[in-house]
Amino acid sequence: MLIGMSMGGYLAGRAAAFEHRLAACVLHDGVYDFHAAIAATADRVAATPGGFETAVAQNTTTRWAVRNGCWTFGVPDLEALVQATKPYTMAGLADRITCPTLVLEAENDQFFAGQPQRVFDDLTCRKELLTFREGEGAGEHCHAGALLLFHERTFDWLDTVLGRQAASGNVRPGDDFA
């Protein structure tokens, strides 16, 4: 079983597309095109009067996304980050996932709005899409502030999926899932 959170929602999906021994995969939240999110951030920065310095001074989300992105990808600036993220898409990969896949979505996701649905639509395996709502306190990216609800719904889904696999003889209770 594999669970990926935030950008891990892309990385876990990519791994599942090539690793067919997985019993299940959870994309928390589903990311279809990481590059699109970074490119949109670059566009917002470019449209900000005063440019980069003003944008990062005024918006903590932008500041975090750019600085963390540059650090994570080992690049010096936003322009290089935009270039480095171009290959990070599930286009042409999602339909290669064969294990049951749970795609999670946050109603107000500030980074990847609409992307979980795109991943879900491209999947051809057994799949489910769960949307976490603001009214539940779970509407923000990766359901910050509602991790108990995330755990409840995710582990209920895993219990059902892995329980069916065990009942069908595909796995035995106690097996070590990849």
Image: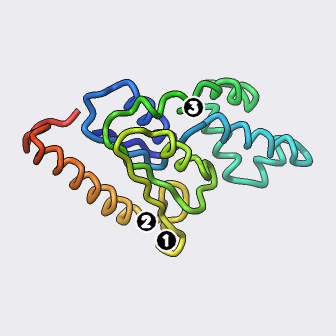
C-alpha span from label 1 to label 3 = 29 Å
What SS does tag 1 mark?
loop
Kind of residue indicated by mark 1: Gly
C-alpha span from label 1 to label 2 = 6 Å
Question: What is the quadrant of residue 118 in the picture?
Answer: top right
- What residue is shown at x 39% (from left), y 33% (from top)? 97
Q: Nearer the viewer, residue 29 or 18?
A: 18
What SS does tag 2 mark?
loop
Residue 63 x %, y %? 70, 46
C-alpha span from label 3 to label 2 = 27 Å
- Which image quarter holds the N terminus? top left
Which residue is disc 3 drawn over?
89
* Disc 1 to disc 2: CB gap under 8 Å: yes
Q: Alpha-carbon neighbours of circle 3 within 10 Å: few (<14), some, or many (≥20)? A: many
Which residue is disc 2 drawn over?
146
Q: Alpha-carbon neighbours of circle 1 within 10 Å: few (<14), some, or many (≥20)? A: some
- Residue 6 seen anywhere in this rendered image of the structure: no
- What residue is shown at x 50% (from left), y 39% (from top)? 122
Q: Nearer the viewer, residue 163 or 26?
A: 163
Which residue is disc 1 drawn over?
137
* Disc 1 to disc 3: CB gap under 8 Å: no
Q: Alpha-carbon neighbours of circle 2 within 10 Å: few (<14), some, or many (≥20)? A: some
